[in-house]
Structures are given as C-alpha cells and as structure tokens.
Image (cartoon, rainbow, N blue to C red):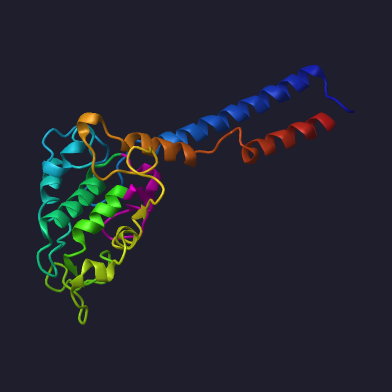
C-alpha cells in the first residue's frame, strides 16, 4: 500500500509536528538554562539576586549578582579567606596590575552571565568552573600592559604552588621574573594564568556583542547579558537545522512509502 488512510496519515503528521515542537522547546529551554545562573563554586550564591552593598570593583553587578557583599570585600584583599591566595608572592603587584586581578575575581564570583562557559569539574572545593570565556581584546591587552612589569614565578596560577604555610608560595627553584617573562603576549597571560578560564578574543572587542567585558559602566547596562544570550542560543539545538530535521523527514518518508 502506497499511502495510509487519510485519518491515519493525519495522526502521523500531527504526531511528527508534536515531536518537532517538543524538540524545539527542549532546545530553547537548554539555551535559557545558560542565562542568569550562578556556578556551583566555593562562595557562589545558589541563584543571582540584588546585592546593594557590593564593594568597589564588584559593584557593577549589584543589580543581579552571584556574590554576597562579604565575598566582594574579600575579593579586594590579598590572601583573603576566599582562597588564601597571595597575589604578591614575588613582591607587591603594581596598583594598576592588582586592579585587573580584583576585577577578574569580581567577574568570577559575581557575574550571572557565565552560563555558556560553565563546565563540571572534579574538585574538592567546587563542582563547576568556567572555561574558554571569550574575553574582549581590550580587556586582555590592558591586563597584560598593566602587569608586564610586576613580578611572578609561574605561568599557571591554578596549580603547582607550595601551600605549606597556608597561603601560596613559589615552588622551590621557581624564580621571580617580570610578568613578560612568563607571559610574553597578552594571549599567553589571559589564557594560561587560570588554565584556560579565558579565551583571548582577537577578532572581537567591547561592544561587539561577542565577547565578555571584565570592565563595564553599570549606568550603561551590563553588556555581558547580550553576550551570554548570543552564545546560549548558539549552544541550543536548532530544530530547523539539517541535523535535527533529517530524522523527522526520514521517518515521514518511511511512513508515506510503507
């Protein structure tokens, strides 16, 4: 038989349409799940909310934040209770350099717009981390420019420290050199220092809608909201794409020719 009865065919078509709509809804939901979320980290809130008293450089996120006021204060301190991390392990960073690390920590702790880059991690102190955040080229270049004369002893600050004193110290035989020794380019700094938490964007700058800004004026709104939405939508499956529609078309043809 070339074709089924009209009533049966109508049921099949409506069934396929229902399946297609369900798949589309699932794809949209997947994209929405990546927006306005907090990662499962050591000090992050369960969900973002207003925090009127965020401290200094963390204040741009006060309207919707994943950090508390106390976390924002600690983010400005060396070897704070957050991670016992000493940024001045090779002498004091220049004030301009230190500001970038504070801003980096504020973004990490406070931003609700990092969902597209959150990944599960097997760690004793957190269940999720971020990877390959597309950092705007201006932010990366300024970070390197302001830090190239400060000193450090490592290119990867995520691991390999001597923690015997309770705070991070340089490993044995790790010599202190200017940042430019361990990070010869802005890309090497932004991508290596936190084990690929950032991906240095060479093509996109501030205002492009395709890279995350570490620095922004909250009076002009948070530009990272649109960036997160762009990448969340890119991550969600498109029901009209060939990869998604092909199985439905194949099934429909099989039913028609059965």
Q: Is residue 175 above or below residue 88?
A: below
Q: Position of residue 145 (x, y in %)?
A: 23, 57
Q: Nearer the viewer, residue 107 or 175?
A: 175
For the point 16% across and 72% down, the residue is 169
For the point 84% across and 32% down, the residue is 257
Q: Is residue 164 visible?
A: yes
Q: How many marks?
A: 0
**Magenta span includes 161:** no
Q: Would you say 240 lies left or right of 229 here?
A: right
- For the C terminus, the quadrant is top right
Residue lying at the far top in this picture: please name it: 7
Q: Would you say 239 lies left or right of 162 here?
A: right
Q: Nearer the viewer, residue 98 or 85?
A: 98
Q: Quadrant of residue 240?
A: top right
Q: Position of residue 46 (x, y in %)?
A: 26, 40
Residue lying at the far bottom in this picture: please name it: 173
Q: Is residue 64 above or below residue 213?
A: above
Q: Position of residue 88 (x, y in %)?
A: 12, 65
Q: Is residue 244 above or below residue 85?
A: above
For the point 28% across and 60% down, the residue is 124
Q: Is residue 82 visible?
A: no
For the point 51% across and 34% down, the residue is 26
Q: Quadrant of residue 69?
A: top left
**Start-end of magenta stretch:** 113-137
Residue lying at the far right in this picture: please name it: 1
- For the N terminus, the quadrant is top right
Q: Is residue 255 above or below residue 111?
A: above
Q: Position of residue 51 (x, y in %)?
A: 16, 34
Q: Quadrant of residue 178?
A: bottom left
């Amino acid at each position: 038989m070339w074709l089924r009865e009209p009533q049966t065919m109508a049921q099949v078509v409506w069934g396929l349409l229902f399946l297609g709509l369900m798949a589309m809804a699932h794809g949209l939901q997947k994209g929405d799940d990546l927006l306005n979320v907090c990662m499962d980290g050591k000090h992050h809130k369960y969900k973002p909310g207003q925090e009127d008293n965020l401290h200094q450089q963390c204040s741009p996120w006060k309207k919707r934040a994943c950090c508390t006021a106390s976390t924002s204060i600690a983010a400005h301190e060396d070897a704070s209770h957050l991670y016992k991390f000493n940024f001045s392990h090779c002498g004091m960073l220049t004030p301009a350099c230190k500001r970038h690390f504070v801003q980096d920590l504020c973004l990490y702790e406070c931003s609700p717009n990092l969902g597209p880059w959150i990944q599960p991690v097997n760690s004793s102190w957190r269940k999720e981390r971020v990877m390959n955040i597309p950092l705007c080229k201006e932010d990366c270049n300024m970070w390197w420019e302001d830090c190239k004369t400060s000193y450090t002893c490592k290119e990867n600050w995520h691991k390999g420290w001597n923690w015997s004193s309770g705070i991070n110290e340089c490993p044995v035989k790790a010599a202190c050199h200017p940042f430019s020794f361990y990070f010869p380019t802005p890309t090497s700094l932004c991508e290596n220092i936190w084990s690929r938490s950032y991906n240095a964007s060479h093509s996109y700058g501030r205002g492009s809608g395709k890279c995350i800004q570490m620095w922004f004026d909250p009076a002009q709104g948070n530009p990272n909201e649109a960036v997160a939405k762009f990448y969340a939508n890119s991550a969600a499956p498109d029901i009209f794409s060939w990869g998604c529609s092909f199985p439905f078309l194949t099934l429909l043809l099989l039913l028609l020719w059965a």
